[in-house]
Amino acid sequence: MTSNGFTTCLWFDGDAEAAADYYVSLFKDGKLGRVARYPETGPGQTGAVMTVEFEINGQRFVGLNGGPQFTFSEAISFQIDCDDQAEADHYYDELTKDGGEESACGWVKDRFGVSWQVIPAGFTEVIADPDPERAARAMAAMMKMKRLDVAELRRAADAGQGVSAK
């Protein structure tokens, strides 16, 4: 990993290596980097993973086992821009299994507590339609959804009717 640009540091309570392994297996171009272990001088248990570097979708991360002092919140999330609905459904399903949680409007929290926005292709175009009435109908439909479904959003925009929660 290079020293140029930005690296996102994620603070874990002992799960940094498991999280890194999970994320690099989830994204097709994920790769692990260096793992640093706590020395005898601490502050963590000697030999335990202190940091693990990894990269997904070209974004560099460091997972830090810093302890229980800080936890993740929805105030920070990672947006996954998907090529189509099938790819969006794949990430949504994977991120919500094994303890992950659905939220609203395409947001999910994975089993480590990290928040993600899973965005299928076409979403922004339908929500930001230049016709304010179409955009409003699509937005009203989105507000009832957990998983974003662009086909349903387009139907709502076209028909002028809401859709049921998914």
Image (cartoon, helix red, strand yellow):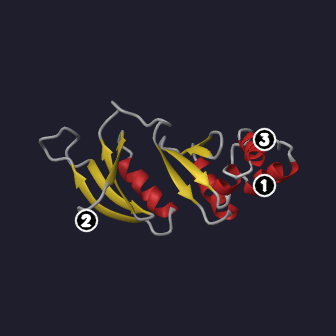
Q: Distance between the residues labelled 3 and 1?
A: 15 Å
Percent position (x, y) of residue 131? 74, 50
Please report whichever mark, 2 or 1, sits nearer to the chain's N-terminal start.
Answer: 2
Residue 165's disc number: 3
Residue 33's disc number: none
Secondary structure at badge 1 equals helix
Please report whichever mark, 3 or 1, sits nearer to the chain's N-terminal start.
Answer: 1
Q: How far apart are marks 2 and 1 (CA)?
A: 42 Å
Residue for badge 1:
154
Q: Nearer the viewer, mark 3 or mark 1?
A: 1
Which residue sits at x=31%, y=43%?
65
Q: Give 143 or 33, whichever is nearer the viewer.
A: 143
Q: How crowded is mark 1: few (under 14 residues within 10 Å), some or many (20 or more)?
A: many
Q: Nearer the viewer, mark 2 or mark 1?
A: 1
Q: Give 40 or 112, whichever is nearer the viewer.
A: 112
Percent position (x, y) of residue 70? 36, 32
Residue for badge 2:
2
Q: How far apart are marks 2 and 3 (CA)?
A: 44 Å
Identify which amino acid the numbered label 3 is placed on.
Ala
Please report whichever mark, 2 or 3, sits nearer to the chain's N-terminal start.
Answer: 2
Q: Residues within 10 Å of mark 3 (few under 14, many from 20)?
A: few
Percent position (x, y) of residue 36? 23, 54
Identify which amino acid the numbered label 1 is placed on.
Arg
Identify which amino acid the numbered label 2 is placed on.
Thr
Which residue sits at x=39%, y=45%?
15
Residue 88 falls in image quadrant: bottom right
Q: Is residue 88 visible?
A: yes
Considering the image in quadrants, where does the N terminus appear?
A: bottom left
